[in-house]
């Protein structure tokens, strides 16, 4: 018993020691080398559109809200295509025709097999009739033998009747395929793509559409965002859409989808525009879509600029900050700001008017455009290590191998967004047409 107690105490001590080791290793790997989690601070100038004089922009393209994707039937080949890429089509317009020569031969073969089965059934029924007559005149000792033969033939008849029905269904499908060899459009739109040799998507495993048609009418905007700046983008975020030719022409909309299931492959998406930094060149990009409040004046395939709507569309004096950055726990408003020592501190602010539509407050005192502030969360504690989203490390950080987000004032990037990786474009001059691209070939109907 004493030995068991000693062993039990030893096991407990080992568990305690292991826990202390894990705690020390975890603590030593945290930024700043203390118990506080490192927080990311964004530029006040960028958040409020003041001080820096620029707004982060993304390249975008106008797409149809709905797209008809046509995939080829299995084991069928196309004989003739009646339309071209970029051609307008109406409901009922013939698009292409399947090659029915092979199906016609299969139909003829199936017809011959059907006749053979029918003749076989007739032969079996004749044999049953003959045996039934012979059974009536046969002696009692042979009755069982006749009965067995008749039942076997009847079973064969049922099997052949089943085979007949199966062959009829097969012929019906072939006949239907031949009759519907010409595929017509079910929507009015523009032919976006024709892939005569469809491949399979390496990410989803889905077969590429043979033909895609963009519906005309209601439009949306497609852009792309990288894994690095994903945290600064969210579904429901208001955006402003600018014409690339005339910056005074603007539209408003809302991010309705960020499609993380279909990464953008290749470099020909037309969304990524260099901002003078290639630090995010290896970042994965994902498409996002913006629903427009109005598409009047926009054209399908038109290239535009997108930027987060932080209230810059309104002519308002002073500095206006989103209310979600302002804390009122103890009555007096404050924000969590990065101090001169690189640590987090409470910064009291004086508030002016409130814009209810944009949910922003005018900052009368307490902040400058050059300050950096952190989004309030349970991790915000006085003295916590802070990452400024300008590519610098927090003071006292011992994690020399830790990666940080690129971007900052020198690149004109909001919250560490990298233009190369996420399609962000900075200080874009009016009329610049350097960021060319094409509509998505993977766009599906918006849920």
Image (tube, helix red, strand yellow):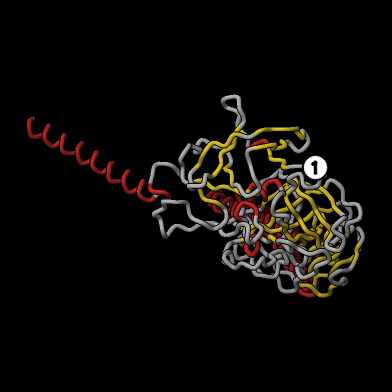
Across and down, in percent, residue 396 comes to 41, 51
Q: Circle 1: is it few (<14), some (14-19), or many (20+) Cα within 10 Å?
A: few
**Between 381 and 318, which is closer to the camera in this rendering?**
318
Across and down, in percent, residue 171 comes to 77, 62
Residue in the image at 67% along x and 65% along y: 275
The answer, for residue 179, to whether it is visible in the render is: no
In the drawing, does residue 62 fall left or right of residue 31?
right
Image quadrant where one finds the N terminus: top left
* Quarter where residue 164 is shown: bottom right
* Quarter where residue 330 is shown: top right
Query: For the view shown, which residue lies furthest in the top direction?
Result: 331
Q: How many marks?
A: 1
Q: Is residue 400 above or below residue 86?
A: above
**Between 86 and 297, which is closer to the camera in this rendering?**
297
Across and down, in percent, residue 112 comes to 75, 69
The answer, for residue 358, to whether it is visible in the render is: yes
**Between 76 and 420, which is closer to the camera in this rendering?**
420
Q: Which residue is mark 1?
A: 316
Question: What secondary structure is found at the residue carrying circle 1?
Answer: loop
Across and down, in percent, residue 14 comes to 20, 41
């Amino acid at each position: 018993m004493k030995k068991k107690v000693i062993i039990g105490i030893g096991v407990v001590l080992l568990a305690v020691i292991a826990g202390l080791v894990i705690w020390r290793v975890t603590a030593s790997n945290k930024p700043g080398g203390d118990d506080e989690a490192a927080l990311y601070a964004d530029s006040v100038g960028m958040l409020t559109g003041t001080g820096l004089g620029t707004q982060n922009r993304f390249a975008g393209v106008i797409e149809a809200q709905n797209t008809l994707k046509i995939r080829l039937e299995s084991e069928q080949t196309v004989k003739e295509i009646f339309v071209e890429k970029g051609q307008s089509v109406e409901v009922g317009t013939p698009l292409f025709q399947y090659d029915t020569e092979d199906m016609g031969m299969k139909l003829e073969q199936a017809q011959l097999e059907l006749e053979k089965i029918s003749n076989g059934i007739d032969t079996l029924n004749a044999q049953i009739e003959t045996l039934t007559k012979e059974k009536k005149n046969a002696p009692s000792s042979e009755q069982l033998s006749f009965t067995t033969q008749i039942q076997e033939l009847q079973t064969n008849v049922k099997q052949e009747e089943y085979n007949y029905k199966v062959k009829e269904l097969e012929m019906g499908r072939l006949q239907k395929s031949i009759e519907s060899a010409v595929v017509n459009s079910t929507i009015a739109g523009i032919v976006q793509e024709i892939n005569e040799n469809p491949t399979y998507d390496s990410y989803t495993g889905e077969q590429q559409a043979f033909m895609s048609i963009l519906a005309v009418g209601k439009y949306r905007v497609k852009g792309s965002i990288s894994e690095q700046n994903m945290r600064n983008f969210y579904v429901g975020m208001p955006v402003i859409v600018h014409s690339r030719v005339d910056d005074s022409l603007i539209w408003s909309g809302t991010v309705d989808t960020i499609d993380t299931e279909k990464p953008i492959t290749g470099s020909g998406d037309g969304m990524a525009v260099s901002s003078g930094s290639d630090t995010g060149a290896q970042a994965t990009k994902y498409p996002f879509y913006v629903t427009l409040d109005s598409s009047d004046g926009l054209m399908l395939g038109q290239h535009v600029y997108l930027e987060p709507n932080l209230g810059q569309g309104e002519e308002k004096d002073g500095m206006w900050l989103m209310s979600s950055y302002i804390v009122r726990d103890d009555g007096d408003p404050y924000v969590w700001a990065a101090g001169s020592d690189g640590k987090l501190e409470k910064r009291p602010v004086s508030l002016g008017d409130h814009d209810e539509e944009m949910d922003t407050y005018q900052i009368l005192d307490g902040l400058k455009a050059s300050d950096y502030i952190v989004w309030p969360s349970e991790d915000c504690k006085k003295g916590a290590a802070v990452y400024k989203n300008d590519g610098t490390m927090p003071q006292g950080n011992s994690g020399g191998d830790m990666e940080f987000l690129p971007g900052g004032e020198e690149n004109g990037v909001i919250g560490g967004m990298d233009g190369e990786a996420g399609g962000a474009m900075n200080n874009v001059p009016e009329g610049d047409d350097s960021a060319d691209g094409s509509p998505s070939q993977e766009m599906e109907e918006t849920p």
